[in-house]
Amino acid sequence: MNLEQALLIYPGNSAEPGVCHLVFARDAPDGPAVLIGNPEDNPSTAPTNALERIAALIANRLFGGQLSFRLYQYEPEGVPTLAPTFYAIQWRGQQPGSMPTWEPIEPAADPFLAAADRLVRREPYTLKALAGLRIIDGTEPAGVVGELRTSAGRA
C-alpha cells in the first residue's frame, strides 16, 4: 500500500482558510482511503466543521470527482477524553457526502489506519512540523496555479 501525504487548504468559516493534513492511499486493501488530520496550529475552521467541503475537495482533487473512498479523521484531542482519537466518517444523508457522523475507531481495526497512524501521531502535530509536504490549495479553482502561488510553494 502506497501512503501519500499532503496539506489541504480549504475555505473555512472565517476570513482565514483552514489547513488539514491528508494521508491517503489509492491502493488500500479495501479501496481508496483518506485520513484527515487536524494539526494543532490549524489557523481557522476545524475539519469537523467543514467536513462536507473537505470531502468534496478530496473527491475532486484526488479521485476525479468520485466520493467512493473511505474517510477517517484524526483529532489530537478527541472527545470526550481529549486524547488522540481516530474516527470513521459515515455519510447518513440522501446525497453522497452529506450528513456525516463520526464513530471512534481503533487504528488496528483497519490496515490503512494502522499504516497511517505513525504519520499523524507525532509531537508536535503542527503545520510547521509538516512543512515540506505537497500543498493542495482548495481555495482556488482546480487546475489554476498562479506563478506567485507556485513560487510560494503552493500547487
Image: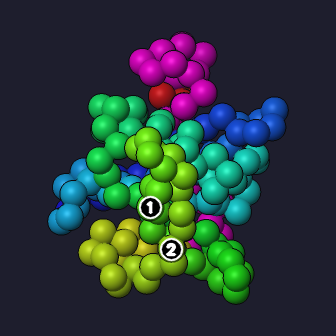
Front-most of residues 15 and 70: 70
Dot 1 or dot 2: first in sequence order is 1
Which residue is pictured at 61% across the width and 69% down the height?
75
Q: Is 82 colored magenta in this rendering?
A: no
x then y, percent, for residue 152: 60, 27
Vertical order, 62 against 132 (above or below): above
Q: Is 137 colored magenta in this rendering?
A: yes
Q: Quadrant of residue 24?
A: bottom left
Q: CA distance from mark 1 to mark 2?
A: 8 Å
Vertical order, 73 against 123 (above or below): above
Secondary structure mainly formed by the magenta segment? loop
Q: Is residue 26 left or right of residue 82?
A: left
Q: Is residue 115 left or right of residue 132?
A: left
Q: Amino acid at mark 1?
A: Gln
Number of numbered labels in the structure image: 2
Which residue is pictured at 47% across the width and 56% down the height?
92
Whether residue 118 is visible: no
Vertical order, 18 against 155 (above or below): below
- Do the CB atoms of the residues marked 1 and 2 lie less than 8 Å apart? yes
Whether residue 57 is visible: yes
x then y, percent, for residue 69: 31, 52
Q: Residues within 10 Å of mark 1 (few under 14, many from 20)?
A: some
Q: Which mark is residue 90?
A: 1
Front-most of residues 99 and 144: 99
Vertical order, 40 against 128 (above or below): below
Which residue is pictured at 31% across the width and 38% down the height?
66
Residue that carries the numbered disc 2 in the rendered image: 103
Q: Is residue 114 left or right of residue 7?
A: left
Magenta-highlighted residues: 122-150
Q: Which mark is residue 35?
A: none
x then y, percent, for residue 125: 62, 66
Which residue is pictured at 70% across the width and 63% down the height?
40
